[in-house]
Amino acid sequence: MSKIEINNIYKIFGPNAQQVMPMVKDGASKEQVLEETGHTVGLDNVSLSIEEGEIFVCMGLSGSGKSTLIRHINRLIDPTAGEVLVNNIDVCTLDEKEILEFRKKTMSMVFQRFGLFPHKTIIENVAYGLEIQEVPEDQRHEIAQGQIKAVGLEGFEHQYPAQLSGGMQQRVGLARALATDPEILLMDEAFSALDPLIRSEMQNQLVELQAKLKKTIVFITHDLDESLKLGDHIGILNGGRLVQVGRPEDIILNPADDYVKAFVKDVNRSKVLRARTIMTKLDQFDKSSINPSSTYKYDEDTFIEDIVPKVLKDRSTIEVIDKEGITTGFITSDELSVALTKTK
Amino acid sequence: MIRKFLTYYTFPIIFVWLLVVSYNSSKRKPDSVMELLTDPSWLYDWPKWLDIPLMKWINDGFKVFNEKYGIYFEVINDFLLGAILSLKKFLIVLPWPLVIALVVAIVFFSSGRKLGTTVFVGICTFFIGFLHPKFWDKAIETTSIMIIGILICIIIGIPLGIAMARNNKLRNAILPVLDLMQTIPSFCYLIPGIMLFGLGAVPAIIATVIYAVPPLVRLTDLGITLVDTEVIEAAEAFGASKKQKLLGVQLPLALPNIMQGINQCTMMALAMVVIASMIGTRGLGDEVLLGLQQLNVGKATEAGLAIVLLAIVLDRITQAYGKKIQDRNKPPK
């Protein structure tokens, strides 16, 4: 059972969404629907499943429906058709009281423009989720204090959000989302409004936090590098349709269509692909060519960025080993050149 | 099908009905409808029979209304009059230096301890009585009427503004009413006010509320609508109920706008209290009116100045508080 399962979600914006549904189901394009009925197709038959403890990145350009999709998971938006299962419960069937309870306990959200409360201090902001749950004040401030420390903002507890820089504000956003200890974290373009250096810093902080916390994270972005860096799985949306779901290396090596191809064209492959993905398997490799004195062992999860200099400079062969140290394959300059240049 | 029929034909049907009614009720209608066809002279001058008997309807309706429900208005009248009188008595019994000290204290704390504003307002308050001793009691009388009027405005206006912000249908229904309240000349409702409540302070309060409540309603609605959608989404994402969202996020963030509304409301109430002197409301407006009647320019100007001073004092108090909240929400970077 997956943590979050989205089955055949459709979302149509407009006054008579249900009447437009058959047209969309018959495969009419977004432009066609808009021209004929004035309705906007937000999501068109999207299905995906997200496993517990992974970072699922949902990527697409603006208008591709990614922000709409994430808001279906906590039902800030109701779907026109389809179901969203979280912990095997259909979110769309919950009544008003249940949905509030569900949002309080199960998930929290981080926003692109931070969504902080300007009239509350940092500690009050971080404690907001607990305040809604009616946790007594000293208790919730104690928890909030811990989260503020975790994101490195000690000393700013009693300032107001407007007194902090963008990066610091988003740390508050992150701390606020973590304070309720949710199972699921929804991050809507959380780092997009930050400048590149801060963004990269925040990405690292998220990866670090995730290694400890093991939350299920749904991360929305329009930045491919970001999605490759963070994502265990990536889903690519275009015009409300899900065009490809896969591991980062699947997306790079086997782009599903021209849209994805255009996206991955400029990616630095050596930073994304791992030894395991590009090696020639042990049984298919001609071992006679190996010179044992210039063979190095590398873990199968190593990025090829780290292998390139060894292979190219010293003409060495890389012996790829798994966690138990058993050899699973080999990489030579042949494999490298194919991996770094191949475009299907 | 029926709904479509109604939207297309309701207004034409009402219009035709009004035509028939006006024709039938007119005393100067032609002998027969046929005459209209043979003699087209009615096309040149507006015919006498083309006249909705709206005046008669309103007069009759008002009379019935007054007879049937007049007793309730008396209760309201007694209540409001009692409130004004006790407030006025309380303020007049206080020694004037104490009143000035009170005003100064209020300004000092509501403005976030700004010394300049506080001193300025203190001097303005002093000058009201300094212009002419009898202005002091008159100003207190005017202020009492206004305070009661503004309280009623707040009790009506803020909840209405909140309701409008939450419900688009209600907003569309209320907005034209607000326009009407602001554009109908005040004398049109001063007169029925007198008929329902008698001369004096109470019809002045009713007129004040009608005139001054629209900006408060609008600015409350606007303030809540303008709260950043992402901030609202954040509250929702954490499972905030409607009540928690309103009290914890929307109202506090709309407060600068609401305070602006109360400020506008105060200024308009002051303007109306002066006009209301024409229906026998006592206070500073009374003095202006007297000066005009006696062609005593000096007296009218003096009283006018006193009103300006009172306006400055009330404006500073309400503005200062709004600004303090705004500064807290958006401190300088």
Image (cartoon, rainbow, N blue to C red):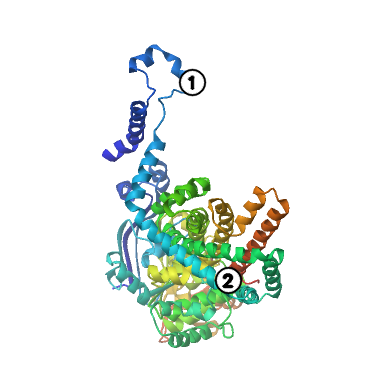
Q: Which amino acid does label 2 sit on?
A: Ile
Judge whether residue B292 can be spotted in this image.
Answer: yes
Q: Are marks 1 and 2 on the same chain?
A: yes
- Residue with the mark numbered 2: B92
Quadrant of residue B47 in the image?
Answer: top left
In terms of secondary structure, where does tag 1 sit? loop
- Residue with the mark numbered 1: B45
Return the residue nearer the eye: B144 or A312.
Answer: B144
Task: Indicate the position of residue B220 as horizontal and vertical percent values.
Answer: 49, 61
Task: Indicate the position of residue A78 as horizontal and vertical percent values.
Answer: 35, 60
In terms of secondary structure, where does tag 2 sit? helix
Task: Indicate the position of residue A239 as horizontal and vertical percent values.
Answer: 43, 53
Pointer 1 indicates a residue of which chain?
B
Residue under the point 29% across and 36% down? B5
Pointer 2 indicates a residue of which chain?
B
**Residues under labels 1 and 2: Cα distance?**
61 Å
The residue positioned farthest toward the top in the image shown:
B38
Q: Which amino acid does label 1 sit on?
A: Asp
Task: Indicate the position of residue A151 as horizontal and vertical percent values.
Answer: 53, 82
Count of all numbered marks drawn on residues in the image? 2
Neighbourhood count class around disc 1 (C-alpha, 10 Å): few under 14, some 14–19, many 20 upward: few
Mark toward the viewer: 1 or 2: 2
The residue positioned farthest toward the front in the image shown:
B294
The answer to whether B272 appears left or right of B164 in the picture is: right
Quadrant of the drawing holding the N terminus of chain A: bottom left
Quadrant of residue B34 in the image?
Answer: top left
Q: Earlier in the sequence, mark 1 or mark 2?
A: 1
